[in-house]
Image (cartoon, rainbow, N blue to C red):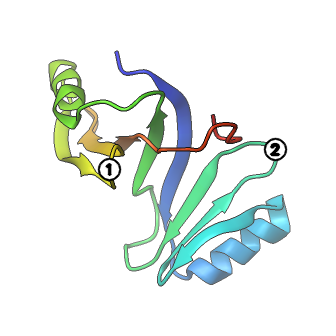
Amino acid sequence: MIRTYGLTHIALPVKDVHRTALFYEKVLGTRTIYRRSGFIQVQTPGSHDILVFEEGIPSGGSIHFGFRLVESADPDDLASIVLAAGGEVKDKGSFGPGEPYLFFYDPDGYLVEIFFENLPAGSPYL
């Protein structure tokens, strides 16, 4: 079993990231924590959950959902666990030094991400 902090984010395809981010800010009080062209991440109030909005992908459904690892792990070891459980590996690697990730499909075809972030001691995300 892979230890995570639980579900941390869901990535959704949208037509206009700015319109969508503003909508969730007005309705739920989210706040933008990261943006780049065609991509905005907002944090939900009262938790550390993230909604990721991405343009350029047909709307509807989800792009993927993600789980943050409790501790860093070798992507090959993570892939072995997923494969043994009946999943299919899509991609694995590192976002940066000591920050491994693995994208995989569950048996129903949903894309799932597990990843590790180097967060400073005392981070509210720990």
Quick check: 5 above or below 124? above
Return the residue found at the far top: 1
Q: Give the secondary structure at mark 1.
A: loop
Q: At label 2, which amino acid type do we have? A: Gly
Say if residue 110 shows up in the picture: no
Question: Which disc, if any, is residue 97?
Answer: 1
Camera-side residue: 115 or 44? Answer: 115
Identify the residue position indicated by label 2 in the image.
46
Please state if 102 lies on the left or on the right of 15 as rendered.
left
Quick check: 28 above or below 124? below
> Which residue occupies 65% across, 74% down?
20
Quick check: 47 above or below 84? below
Quarter containing the N terminus: top left
> Which residue occupies 22% across, 36% down?
75
Quick check: 23 above or below 97? below
Quarter containing the C terminus: top right
Residue 118 on image: x %, y %: 48, 44
Residue 74 on image: x %, y %: 23, 32
Q: Quadrant of residue 116?
A: top left
- Camera-near label (1 vs 2) is 1
Q: At label 1, which amino acid type do we have? A: Pro
Q: Give the secondary structure at mark 2.
A: loop
> Which residue occupies 46% across, 37% down?
67
